[in-house]
Image (spheres, rainbow, N blue to C red):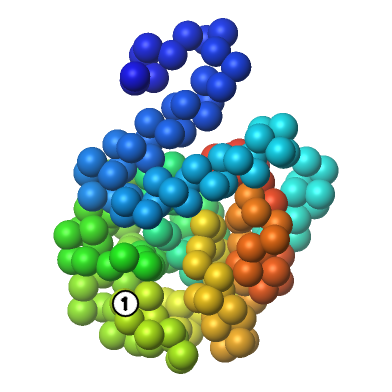
Amino acid sequence: MTHHDIPDTHPRKQSLMLREKIINGLGSNIVATAGLVAHGRGEAFDYILGEQTLPAARTAIDAAAALLTTATRPVISVNGNTAALSAPELVALSAVTGAPLEINLFYRSPEREQAILSHLTEHGATRVLGVGNRATGRVPDLAGPRGQVDPEGILQADVVFLALEDGDRTEQLARLGKKIIAVDLNPFSRTAQYAHVTIVDNIVRVMPL
């Protein structure tokens, strides 16, 4: 089923369209297979929220905007799911705030890096960090590829905007003294708990706000 096949009267039309974006992202090597599971988990929490932005989330969005605009070295962390769902909005946020985009992946490969880079540049991104030999920095106590960061990006950032992120990574970034803004539909996740500003909402609703 494609978005053209989903009737406007379908009560889950928006949800089904987002699923299609994730599935298409898997086919184009932007999304990892595990990203499908993560999206499904988030979808369940979104149902609990009534698939709407609650007042508490709007307050958190205001706080996040203030933190981003007053940051000295903000960085926007991008993974496969966020790129598949909100690439144009992430590029727009980067342009407005001056924060570069940095690709950070739990399941990292040169092919996925290039696929996400191409996807972001197709939507107007002009500065994307964390690709190839740029990701030579490391987050302490994070083994494997997920600990790789760009020395000119997250490693020296004072504020990091991230979404749908691995909890261990969020915890370690916070321990490095980074101020973390997180978008996460699960308020009980480690990312939601360790972030300084947590927006409990769907990224596709948060970004336009």
Q: How many marks overall?
A: 1
Is 208 on the left-hand or right-hand side of 52?
left
The extreme bottom residue here reads 140
Q: Nearer the viewer, residue 91 or 13?
A: 13
90 lies above or below 161: above
Position of 209 relative to 38 (above/below): above
Left or right: residue 140 versus residue 53 is left
- Where residue 74 sits in the image (x, y, percent)? 54, 71
Q: Position of residue 119 (x, y in %)?
A: 28, 47
Percent of width and height locating residue 59: 80, 52
Can you give x and y, in whole percent of width and height, for residue 136 in the image?
A: 29, 85
Q: Name the foreground residue: 59 vs 96.
A: 59
The N terminus - image quarter = top left
Q: Is residue 172 left or right of residue 30?
A: right
Q: Secondary structure at mark 1?
A: helix
Asked whether residue 190 is in view, the answer is: yes
In this view, the residue in front, 202 or 43, is: 43
Q: Residue at x 78, y 41 (%)?
A: 54
**Type of amino acid under label 1:** Pro
- Image quarter of the C terminus: top right
Determine whether 71 is above or below 88 in the image.
below
Is residue 141 placed above or below 146 in the rendered structure? below
Give the residue displayed 31% in from the left and 43% down from the top.
25
**Around disc 1, counting alpha carbons within 10 Å, would you say few (fewer than 14), some (14 to 19), or many (20 or more)?**
some
Q: Residue at x 21, y 79 (%)?
A: 133
Residue occupied by mark 1? 145
Camera sees residue 69: no
Residue at x 72% of width, y 39% of height: 49
